[in-house]
Amino acid sequence: MLRKLSICLILFAALALPLRAVAIQEKFTDMTAEEKALTSVSGSPGAHAVVLFWSEYQDDIDAQASEYFRIKILDEEGKKYGDIEIPYLRGLGNIHEIRARTIHPDGTVVPFDGKVYEKTVVKSRWLRSQVKTFSMPDVRPGSIVEYRYMRTWPSDGLYSTRWSPQRELPILKTRLRLRPYADGRVHSYFLYAGLPQGKEPKLNKDHYELELENTPAFEEERFAPPDNQLKPRVTFFYTSRTLGTSEDFWSRTGNEVADFVEDFIGRDRKEIKQALPAILGDAATPDAKLRKIYARVQQIENLSWEESKTEDETKRQKRRDNRHVGDVLANGYGYSGEINRLFIALVRAAGFQAVPAFVAERDEYFFDKEFLDSRQLSAEVALVTVDGSERYFDPATPFNPFGELTWQSSGVFAMRAVKKSTTFVTTPETDGAKTVTTRKATLKLEEGILKGTVVVTLTGHEAAAWRLASLHDDEAAQKKSFEDEAKGWFPEGSTVKLKSLTGMRSSDEPLVVSYDVELPNLDSAAGSRSMLRISVFESRGQNPFAPERRKHAIYFDYKSRVEDFVEVELPADHRAEVVPAPVNSDLKGVAFYSKWSADQNKLKLERKLVVNTMLVSSEAYPTLRSFFSRVKIADEENVVVRAQ
Amino acid sequence: MRSLRFLGVSLLLSICSVAAFAAAEIPSWVTDAAAEPPGTYDPEISAVCLLDETAVAYTSNGDVRTRRRVVYRILGTEGRELGVARAAFGKDSKLLSLRAWSIPKNGEPYAVKERDAIETSLVDFELYSDRKLRLLQIPAADPGAVIAWEAEHLNKVYALQDSWHFQREIPVVRARYALRYPGAWKHNVVWMNAAPVTPTTGPDGVTWEVTSLAEVKSEVGRPAARAVAGWMGINLDPPAAVSTPSLRSWSDVGAWYADLTSGRAEPDDAIRSKTADLTTGGDVRAKIAALSGFAQRDIRYVAVAIGIGGFQPHAATQIFRGRYGDCKDKVTLLASMLKTIGVDVHYVLVNTDRGAVRADFPGYDSFDHAIAAIKLPKEVDASKFQAVVSHPKHGKLLLFDPTNTVVPFGELPDYLQDSDGLLVAGDGGDLIRLPLAPPEAARLTVDAKATLDVSGALSVEVSEKRTGWLAAKYRQWLSERSTTERQRMVEERAGYSFSNFTLSDLKFENVEAIDRDLVVSYKVTATGYARRAGAMFLVRPRLMGRKAEGLITLDKRKYAYELDAPSVHTDNFTIQFPAALAVDELPPAQDLALPQLRYKSATKVEGETLHYTREYRVEKIDVPFEQLKELNAVFSKILADERNTAVLLPR
């Protein structure tokens, strides 16, 4: 996965040239019989267009690159791919020598002789992001459009390169080449992940080559692992030092991070010692002490989570940079890492062993130890030894519960950053029983409408998600969000009024929302009987896995459960003639339980859906789909009601 | 050695979003507006506009200097989104200055300098437009703050006309429009959706002021904002002609556009040759259809708008050479080609928001789209087309939208029906009403034959046939999706009707053949379709499909509702059930009617087969506010009918 470059001779030749050498450019070619016959692409059925050939030759010595695209238009919709946009950063590069043409199946060639427009994406004092745009002539289904251009950039800098080999359109052939810069003092590396088996950038004389065939269009699916994780990625970069082996890299990263963090924490800082007694108060047990410290640290204003501010506002605040944990405590503000380090400092001062841990969050990528990019370790938490075992704390995420990690940080690799003894550990997964959504409805049937109250209690990651999403919202905005959420459960035409909301600004209490509701459209007629659907929270529920075909694995962000309790009072002279049979389905990873009951004119439903897994292979999809179909069938069950 | 540079775009963008410190001198018009008492508003209102002032000064050569001043009070966190001052500019609209201020709830005020602005191209559907947007982030735009911005422009206008839109999506405490023009000029105004106010005249010219305006909230199915929010149209009238025209009537607007398009449709040899190729053989009708199809399908939609290019089409020769253009370009090329066979075409300017064109104010900015009016030769039977208008002067005109690639020749897209358009003909023009197609012109007929077994499992063969705008909409939906996406979407839709199911044999017919019926067929097998309840089998006769539009939230609603365009939906479903079962009870039939729609359904049993039939007809689009409660009641009854079940018992 890693290859060091060893080219340094080319530099002298390049420097000797007064002008840039012309980079290798692909030649325009006629439509082949095979291309002419192409009407669809296996692996991407119904694709509107296909990239027949994508070629890029990047020459870091001459600071220029040529890029070439050859695209076959397969249907009417595909004609939109005749509109071309080439982005670049003005001042940091330019686009030249755009050549383009359209080739028809009869061999006719229509050269592009139109205007290339310059579109401003963003222009400011610091940046000018531009797009060169043009439209290919006479594009029809069956045509091939091909274009190429040169990209140049200032030759006084070295820039990293990132290729995304999988795109919106399928690509039959990809050829990416890179001629690296080398002067003996810089080192360069390829990092890549997700490439097809046996494919990697390979050295060919003075340049690297990566060739791919038949890359399908990327398909998005619900409940899939992060898109970035599913798509292949290739990064090339320069560095002033060698990376070494994977072990070397992470060991050195650990040492450097430990140095940096420990320097910020310091040893026996007097501000920390002085503050500690007041923070601990009368806490006597280890748990009580940690809770006191945790609560105090969570009060620090977290600059990583504050609303974006203009430079003017920031200047007005006259905030000084925190040089060490003492400053964080004294100033009362800090970025997430600084707050975490303050927690470690206080915990150590209270007599605990504590080390920083850098966590590879899993919301965008899954950690790959061979992908030597320290930015994979995107969050910083604390590991504290309590009663002989290490516990994780994340005091720097607003309202994060004591002793818990965010879902992004749970069940992932983390680096214990200890000088000269860096180790990798796996953070604990959060028990699904801690993330529970409990929905209780107490309703009365009046003239076909269920009226009453609903109380929703959220804990764990569900509560945390709401708290963070509403971090900067006022009461009115929060009310609207919760009402909209509830309206999404209930039948159309429902009235939902939020009555109270508690626990939004707490880390340990559950989040409790109560509503007054009026729910129409849950009953239906069958002659003298009526059918009443009392699974009110799932009246709009759909099987999230209705499609039969699945490409990617199924990925739930975290384990969780939903527990519903519904009580319905019918008019006094009404009775349930038949209640549905109970349902109990347990696949271990997912489980469902539903039970209806009736007593006089009272109906009850207890329902529980448990997701106790996070990753399900695509091979197990039919089983999962069938499970959720059964859930939907159960949720659609009616109680048969008759007037006496 | 070269320096190492690792540049993150996100970092750069975040740097761009900051504004530099500047001394805070707050203009008196801001502090005066900020002194306005807080007022009482619904808790959902997140901001109020304290002042929205537009000052417009015309010069004798028709150039216009404008200054807009806006002051907001932020009431809630959602009001923060107003904390960016935005000013559009372009080739014919020079932005002279953009400034902003903020008075936080606590602390000293801020002034923001223009050098801290960022710019971006103002493109939506266009490949390129010279229009750009300058943005200034306003500091401390938090609840309790008063923020303000001012933009000054020097505009080259295309007509001596303006429109002042004073009612907005948030309450407006005070809005003002000040008009100055050379001494001998005159003005006249037309008020829309608001009572006229008397202007005052002073050193700044003529000033209109309106106060205490309610918000115009977004509502599902609401008519276009121009049709419901208050605005004023202004016409200027110089005593002698100036280089910029005055538009006193729709005929003037038509003449202005005729002048803009003059000569653009001139064909060259290439166009003549292609026209000849496309019209070999066939009668005139076939020739018109062939050339219309070429403009519709073979000219790719690409918009390039620079200055007056937002209104003025490119030359037909240029459009033909590149085989691309926008709506008016397509009309121009079609006009050019039809001209070579002796058929006249007129531009028709329309607005895709129904109700946005107001007959009482002939405004050149009333439109956002152009279609063609093809003057039908006498030998063509106009009765064969739906989209025909009879014009007293120009005879039978067939309206055709070459931009919409899925609407057949002879029909109009649903969003253009029953709205007003400006027919540009000769040296003038007049408003015409675009025809509303009868319900029968757009049909969805679903035939489904199902068999139920004793376990409650159902297998069903479904055929859906669509015509008219219903076919066009579905074609558009299909054309944007790959085969995999189509299958997935149809399965997800089936998921609304069936729980544990498999969908197979999915076929689409005539997706590309837009003048033929669009047919979709598939099979579904679903377990647990019939539910057991004791000895009873509960079977929903309505196998699939939903007819009612979404129930309308009436709480706080203010405006009328627009239904989908007229159409007829017919379901013919049969469910053959096992001989061991007999029907105990059937759901009641329904017959519901409003002036705008009608719904009839019935469930019958014949032998061992349940027959469910229904028809849903939409006759008219507009439902007045006063009828919304009734409309909701009908929708609710339709939803109930769709849920209803038959009860079957063992024999």
Image (cartoon, coloured by chain):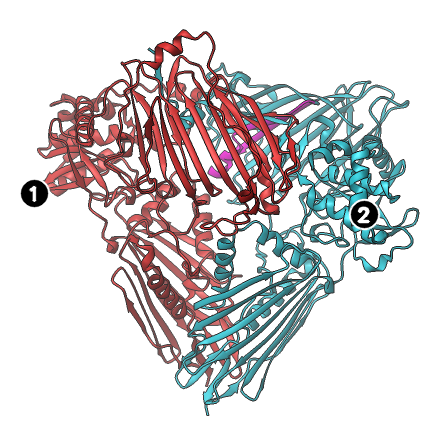
Hue used for the chain lettered B: cyan
Question: Which residue in the protein does label 2 denote?
Answer: B279
| Tint applied to chain A in the drawing | red
Q: Residues within 10 Å of mark 2 (few under 14, many from 20)?
A: some
Amino acid type of disc 1?
Asp
**Residue drawn 32% across the image and 40% down it:** A365
Label 1 close to label 2 by CB (< 8 Å):
no
Residue at disc 2, secondary structure: loop
- The quarter holding residue B442 reads bottom right
Q: Nearer the viewer, residue A3 or B17?
A: A3
Can residue A127 be seen here? The reply is no
Count of labels shown?
2
Image quadrant where residue A257 sits:
top left
Q: Chain of mark 2?
A: B
Q: Which residue was labeled with disc 1?
A: A387
Label of residue A615 in the image = none
| Magenta residue span | B66-91
Task: Out of B87 and B503, give the one closest to the viewer.
Answer: B503
Quick check: A286 left or right of A229? left
Camera-side residue: B20 or A29?
Answer: A29
Q: Residue at x 83, y 51 (%)?
A: B281
Residue in view at x 82 percent, y 60 percent: B384
